[in-house]
Image (tube, rainbow, N blue to C red):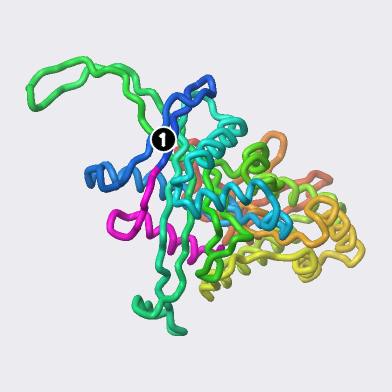
Amino acid sequence: MNEREVAEIRRRFRPDRNSFTNIRGCYVNEMGSMVAQFHQSLTTMSQEESELLLGVLRKALSGGLGKHLRNLSFETSQVAYGEEHKLLMALRDSELKDDPAVEEFFQKVISSVEIEGSYLILLVHDRYDVPYRSKNDERMDDAGDQVFRYVLCAVCPINDTKPALSYYARENEFHNRSMDQLVAPPVLGFLFPAFDERATNLYGALCYTKDPAKEHRAFLDAVFKLEPPMPAAAQMENFQFVLSEALEDEGSYEVVQAVHSQLREMIAIHKENKEREPLELSQSQLTGVLRSCGVSQEQAEVFDRQFEETFGADAMVSPTNLMDFKQMNLTTPNVTVRVNPERGDLVQTRIIDGQKYILIRVEEGVEVNGVAIQIDE
């Protein structure tokens, strides 16, 4: 799924835009035991309550693709014979009315998630009559012929509030407020099946994780029987290692800054062109970036080998996961300097009288711990 497709489904989570037939869930205590299940319709809830619930569910479709949201793909054999895929289809096709399937699913999640404290598992089913869009991207509600039926799951921690003294305006009195349990935004979730090219893709799913550094390996194995994609934080760490190993003596500030600038420019162009598909780069494309930044053929070949060993021969990676494009960090054992990525030209590296220096060109506005200082000749 691309960003526009995710946004289109996310807009369904409004009181007037969905056809949610069932919302099912279960409460799991801090010991990992299912305490209660519930089966509720939005029509029995007040508008305020339904908006709050939909807001929680909508969080499971938030964040960036490749970081918080990761596309998953099933093998053909899994779709044909896999028990995990069969269970997900039972949830969708029954509109969550298959009680044994729902019970089995809840048990799979409970046995695989690692969450401290109590939590909720929420399941919702929706039927979306996909409107047709013309080549000019004009929406034509009467011309659609696609129906997208899907389930969304959200795993939400329960936070306990502390007892406190509260003022009750209606009574004009102070009273002790007892401890409450509040539903927090989801830490984990998924959409099945995928909404690819604005149509149903039974071979795909979209997984959400609040913390991009976590793999949730046990959960993905239990629910999808799939190996988790490499988390965004791990991709950045591994790319930094691969780049450091490949460059060796050619790893100057100018080369690294040039690689940073080229990748940032590629991201900006992709965004300006409003491309529907996420920007992903292959090994050969990244090698081409290195060569254009002055890296020798020999070191580029080292990068190829290191990249293939780390990411895989046919891996496609999002450049947004490879470097921090909000800032550049120059780090020594004792000093860290943060630089605006658009002003990398202000920094130079020099050797003066045999000593290595990082030189930063400054004009006005120099401060130390918030105190303005002057730099005199």
Q: Is residue 247 visible?
A: no
Range of residues picked out in magenta: 1-23
Q: Quadrant of residue 41?
A: top left
Identify the residue position indicated by label 1 in the image.
184
Q: Residue furthest right?
A: 298
Say which residue appears at 63% left-offset and 69% top-offset.
Answer: 266
In the picture as drawn, the residue positioned furthest to the bottom comes out as 135
Give yes or no for residue 38 being in the magenta stretch.
Answer: no
Q: Is residue 244 left or right of residue 213?
A: right
Instruction: Give the x, y percent position of residue 324.
Output: 61, 52
Looking at the figure, which quarter contains the N terminus? bottom right
Image quadrant assignment for residue 321: bottom right
Percent coordinates x, y for residue 12 in the rendering: 38, 59
At x 53%, y 42%, the residue is 101
Give neighbour class at mark 1: few <14, some 14-19, many 20+ (Cα, 10 Å).
Answer: some
**Percent x, y of residue 94:** 47, 51
Q: How many marks?
A: 1
The residue depicted at 58 percent of the width and 69 percent of the height is: 277
Q: Nearer the viewer, residue 273 or 50?
A: 50
Q: Is residue 21 magenta?
A: yes
In the displayed structure, does residue 98 sit left or right of residue 305? left
> Please, what is the three-letter code of the amino acid marked with disc 1?
Ala
Classify 124 as above or below 28.
below
